Image (spheres, grey):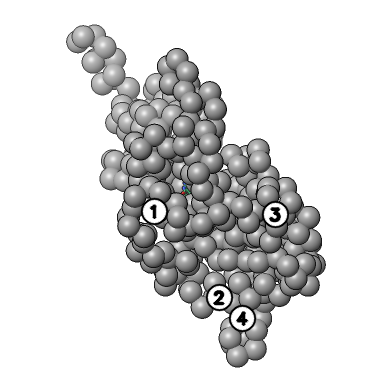
């Protein structure tokens, strides 16, 4: 209405208020409740002034205006614009979202939540967020853990683990799976299958793994254990971080300890074939094999290929079905009627 317009025009801080309101709207859009409120309070204070507030000092003396907002008020009053607002318009939260999604174990929900809380940098998270232990590791070693591991370093890491396993239990066998087994030039992490002759459940391998972990922690090769809530149920997996020690002639020039992600999967001999398929991947290849199995009335998981999975009403699973094959990788392909694919051919 005309009346409201007049009242607005009558306030010497109209332009400043307008720009601050745009900032408040922006923070509201990204669910930054704290900043939205701060801006709204400042706006209310400015509405009550009958002289134009032009300097930082003046603004700071007013109620509900902190030092940063005071700076911004001066910027608007003197330049008629606010750089922060222009940034906010140009780049939405995408960059921060990308940054946070790069933290080990952080998904979209957590990243969005931090953004809504007003966090924008890793430093913000370190100082103000309530990080889980895993997230702390991910933040503290952000750059290392986002650097891919060259194939020859995967091999060097493998040798260290192999030696430790030999000391603990000479019967233990280790296979490096994951992208390394597919022939990748660089890997995101190093994935070990741990097995041993005459084992029938992953529990049979637990003592060996505990020994290996203890040995490698003692060598300061393993530097962190990561809790894995999603897979903790059956205890067949171990996630952590490791550091390759200085090895003369390999990495001793300008040596710097680099944190790497390391995974162990405990696999009894009887499930080796299915586990190899699972842990070699890639994940998309696995999904398509599993889909194919289910189309043929079977079920493939990391432990075996099953048939006659009994389903009750609403297709609820009644039995696991009968194990058809677990031990032999090639046989699983055969039974599924899929032409054998070498690990390096399993990229989807
Ligand atoms: N895997 C899967 N489904 C997932 C995650 C993993 O089937 N959601 C399987 C296939 C992967 C293997 O486990 O190849 C190892 O998982 P990684 O996350 O270590 O993936 P890669 O080793 O394949 O790749 P990267 O080089 O990024 O580690
Ligand atoms: Mg991997
Ligand atoms: Mn892995």
Q: Which of 109 and 172 is in front in this view?
A: 172
Label 1 CB-ligand 1 distance < 8 A: no
Per the rendering, the mark at residue 281 is none
Residue carrying label 2: 155
Question: Residue drawn 78% across and 72% down?
Answer: 167
User: Could you say where residue 314 lies in the image, as x and y percent from the top left?
Assistant: 42, 16
Q: Is 291 placed left or right of 141 in the picture?
A: left
Question: Residue drawn 40% across and 53% down?
Answer: 333
User: Could you say where residue 197 lies in the image, as x and y percent from the top left?
Assistant: 68, 61
Cα gap from disc 2 to disc 3, whole angstroms: 26 Å
Cα gap from disc 4 to disc 3, whole angstroms: 40 Å
Mark 3, residues whose alpha carbon is within 10 Å: few (<14), some, or many (≥20)?
some
Q: Quadrant of residue 184?
A: bottom left
Cα gap from disc 1 to disc 2, whole angstroms: 31 Å
Cα gap from disc 4 to disc 1, whole angstroms: 48 Å
Residue carrying label 3: 199
Could you tell me how many numbered marks the image carries? 4
User: Which mark is first along the chain, 1 or 4?
Assistant: 4
Q: Which of 96 and 165 is in front in this view?
A: 165
Q: Can residue 66 be seen in this view?
A: yes
Q: Is 345 placed left or right of 64 in the picture?
A: left
Q: Which of 336 and 32 is in front in this view?
A: 336
Rendered-image quadrant of the N terminus: top left
Q: What element carries label 3?
A: loop
Q: Which of 28 and 345 is in front in this view?
A: 345
Cα gap from disc 2 to disc 4, whole angstroms: 18 Å
Question: Where 249 sits versus 336, above or below?
Answer: below
Residue farthest left in this picture = 2
Question: Residue drawn 59% across and 39% down?
Answer: 230
Residue carrying label 4: 255
Residue carrying label 1: 334
């Amino acid at each position: 209405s005309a009346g409201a317009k007049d009242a607005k025009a009558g306030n010497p801080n109209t332009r400043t208020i307008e720009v601050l309101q745009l900032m408040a709207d922006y923070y509201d859009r990204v669910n930054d409740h704290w900043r939205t409120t701060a801006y709204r309070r400042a706006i209310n204070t400015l509405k009550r002034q009958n002289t134009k507030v032009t300097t930082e000092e003046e603004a700071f003396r007013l109620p509900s205006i902190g030092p940063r907002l005071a700076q911004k008020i001066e910027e608007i009053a003197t330049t008629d614009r606010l750089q922060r607002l222009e940034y906010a318009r140009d780049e939405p939260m995408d960059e921060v979202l990308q940054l946070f999604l790069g933290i080990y174990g952080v998904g979209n929900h957590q990243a969005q939540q931090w953004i809504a809380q007003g966090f924008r940098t890793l430093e913000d998270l370190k100082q103000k967020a309530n990080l889980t232990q895993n997230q702390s590791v991910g933040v503290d070693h952000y750059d290392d853990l986002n650097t891919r591991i060259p194939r020859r370093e995967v091999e060097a890491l493998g040798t260290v683990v192999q030696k430790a396993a030999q000391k603990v239990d000479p019967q233990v066998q280790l296979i490096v799976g994951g992208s390394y087994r597919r022939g990748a030039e660089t890997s995101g992490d190093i994935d070990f299958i741990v097995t041993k002759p005459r084992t029938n459940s992953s529990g049979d391998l637990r003592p060996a793994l505990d020994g290996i972990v203890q040995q490698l922690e003692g060598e300061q090769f393993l530097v962190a254990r990561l809790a894995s809530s999603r897979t903790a149920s059956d205890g067949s997996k171990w996630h952590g971080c490791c550091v390759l020690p200085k090895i003369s002639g390999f990495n001793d020039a300008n040596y710097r300890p680099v944190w790497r992600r390391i995974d162990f999967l405990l696999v009894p001999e009887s499930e080796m074939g299915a586990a190899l398929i699972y842990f070699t991947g890639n994940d998309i290849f696995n999904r398509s094999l599993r889909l194919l199995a289910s189309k043929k009335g079977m079920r493939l998981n990391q432990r075996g290929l099953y048939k006659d999975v009994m389903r009750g009403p609403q297709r609820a699973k009644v039995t696991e079905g009968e194990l058809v094959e677990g031990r032999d990788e090639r046989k699983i392909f055969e039974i599924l009627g899929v032409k054998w694919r070498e690990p390096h051919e399993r990229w989807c």
